[in-house]
Image: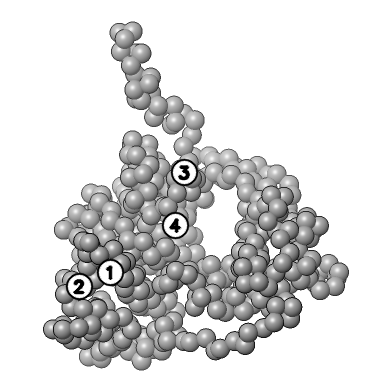
């Protein structure tokens, strides 16, 4: 199918006009209203986006940014549907796209009666919150990631399982105290055999629910705000590929195995752009600016990033005529990456330490055994940092909002850190004076 386009209903309108998503499958054509309207003077027909930079009118600029963010959701959803159908071997149809787009953008939540606070249970509130969060999240429009919804659902299930296992009566807002916290953590560690970070994620998600319920006036128990009611974390070392590893991948001859060749090539694009799986697998010619930059509206955060095209990415784009191979599922690609890494000889021994089920474990792995799609993003950030690129500049490319979160992406050894500092003025000035 042809790449979707965003077109104005009336390009010469004097006032606002609707923006349509348009694409073809063979001779069939879908014209789908995005529900967004704009005055043609603020529309860029080449980039098919709203011109956000309006001098002297900050409010209008913000409105146009919101339009672009919403439009990116439509194009991303089309790519997501197409990718899913390809994996499932489903023949794409115009009507099928319309149905799937309606599910995402046209569904209106049924009106919910305003419950009296005293009649709302913990599980009832969480269940309703999960069903309505994408409609109530502020500021709008701010799409919520499907994986976040899945995390919410999993947390609710775990809470229900915990309540059944304890048989201490109904688990509700008034029961969420420090005694509950310690029992729940113990249950997650010993009964569920979860790692420290997984336990921490469940606690943090529960606190999201409790905070929302408190702000809505439904919960008055604020024990969860105690510092002792903490989301546990454990620093886990994630691998990255150094330049030697990347050379091994680049020079690996996979011409007789197109399956692994496609996986290797897509992964290298991630290593040199820092894009997440859902972004580097949906790059289109429209994302290429002036032949030397990629402009991507990231699906997880909605942020637009511009990334210089590394020479290896340029060669890969040329290899596939600017249409990179279609990706398989994230999980399958993770499996195949380990095959690719082993064939390339990326087999350094890596020691990993983690706490699981309340016990601390140490285990050695071959580096290729730890390679996943997300390794590419960490590789990009770490190698740029080691090359001396300022953190703030890298964050503009990766889309990180805070330096604290960004720094967790880096995995620099003590030796690499020392080598990096050897070229710092603090150490070199004294050396020059001595000479």
Left or right of residue 381: residue 291: left
Neighbourhood count class around disc 4 (C-alpha, 10 Å): few under 14, some 14–19, many 20 upward: many
Q: Report if residue 239 is visible in the image.
A: no
Residue 375 on image: x %, y %: 45, 51
Q: Write down the residue under mark 2.
A: 42
| Coordinates of residue 307 in the picture (x, y in percent) | 28, 53
Q: Which residue is mark 1?
A: 60
Question: Which residue is pictured at 32% across the width and 61% down the height?
Answer: 304
SS type, badge 3: helix
Q: CA distance from mark 1 to mark 2?
A: 10 Å
Residue assigned mark 3: 407
Judging from the image, the colouring scheme is one colour
Residue 227 visible in image: yes
- In terms of image quadrants, where is residue 151? bottom right
Instruction: Name which of mark 2 and mark 3 comes first in the sequence.
Output: 2
The circle drawn on residue 193 is none
* Crowd class of label 3 (few under 14; some 14 to 19; many from 20; radius 10 Å): some
Q: Which x, y percent locates residue 21?
A: 28, 82
Q: What residue is shown with label 4?
A: 373
């Amino acid at each position: 199918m042809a790449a979707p386009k965003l077109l104005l209903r009336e390009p010469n309108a004097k006032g606002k006009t609707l923006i349509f998503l348009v694409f073809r499958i063979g001779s069939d054509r879908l014209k789908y209203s995005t529900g967004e309207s704009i005055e043609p003077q603020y529309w860029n027909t080449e980039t098919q986006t709203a011109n956000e930079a309006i001098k002297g009118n900050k409010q209008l600029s913000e409105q146009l940014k919101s339009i672009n963010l919403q439009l990116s959701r439509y194009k991303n959803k089309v790519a997501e549907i197409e990718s899913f159908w390809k994996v499932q071997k489903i023949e794409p149809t115009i009507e099928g796209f319309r149905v799937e787009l309606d599910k995402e953008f046209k569904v209106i939540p049924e009106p919910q009666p305003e419950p009296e606070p005293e009649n709302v249970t913990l599980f009832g509130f969480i269940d309703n919150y999960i069903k309505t969060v994408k409609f109530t999240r502020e500021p709008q429009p701010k799409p919520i990631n499907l994986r976040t919804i899945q995390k919410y659902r999993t947390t609710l299930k775990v809470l229900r399982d915990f309540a059944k296992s304890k048989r201490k009566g109904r688990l509700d807002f008034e029961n969420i105290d420090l005694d509950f916290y310690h029992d729940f953590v113990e249950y997650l560690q010993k009964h569920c055999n979860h790692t420290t970070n997984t336990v921490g994620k469940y606690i943090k998600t529960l606190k999201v629910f409790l905070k929302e319920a408190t702000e809505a006036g439904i919960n008055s128990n604020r024990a969860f705000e105690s510092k002792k009611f903490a989301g546990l974390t454990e620093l886990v070392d994630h691998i990255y590929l150094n330049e030697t590893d990347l050379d091994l991948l680049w020079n690996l001859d996979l011409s007789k195995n197109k399956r692994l060749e496609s996986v290797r090539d897509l992964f290298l694009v991630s290593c040199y752009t820092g894009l997440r799986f859902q972004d580097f697998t949906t790059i289109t010619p429209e994302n290429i600016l002036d032949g030397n930059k990629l402009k991507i509206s990231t699906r997880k955060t909605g942020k637009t990033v511009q990334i210089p095209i590394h020479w290896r990415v340029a060669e890969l784009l040329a290899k596939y005529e600017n249409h990179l191979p279609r990706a398989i599922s994230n999980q399958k690609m993770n499996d195949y990456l380990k095959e690719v890494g082993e064939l390339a000889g990326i087999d350094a021994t890596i020691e990993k330490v983690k706490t699981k089920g309340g016990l601390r474990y140490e285990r050695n792995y071959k580096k290729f055994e730890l390679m996943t799609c997300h390794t590419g993003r960490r590789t990009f950030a770490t190698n740029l940092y080691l090359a001396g690129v300022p953190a703030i500049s890298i964050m503009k490319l990766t889309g990180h909002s805070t330096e604290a979160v960004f720094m967790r992406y880096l995995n620099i050894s003590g030796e690499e850190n020392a080598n990096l500092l050897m070229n710092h003025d603090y150490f070199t000035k004294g050396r020059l004076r001595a000479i």
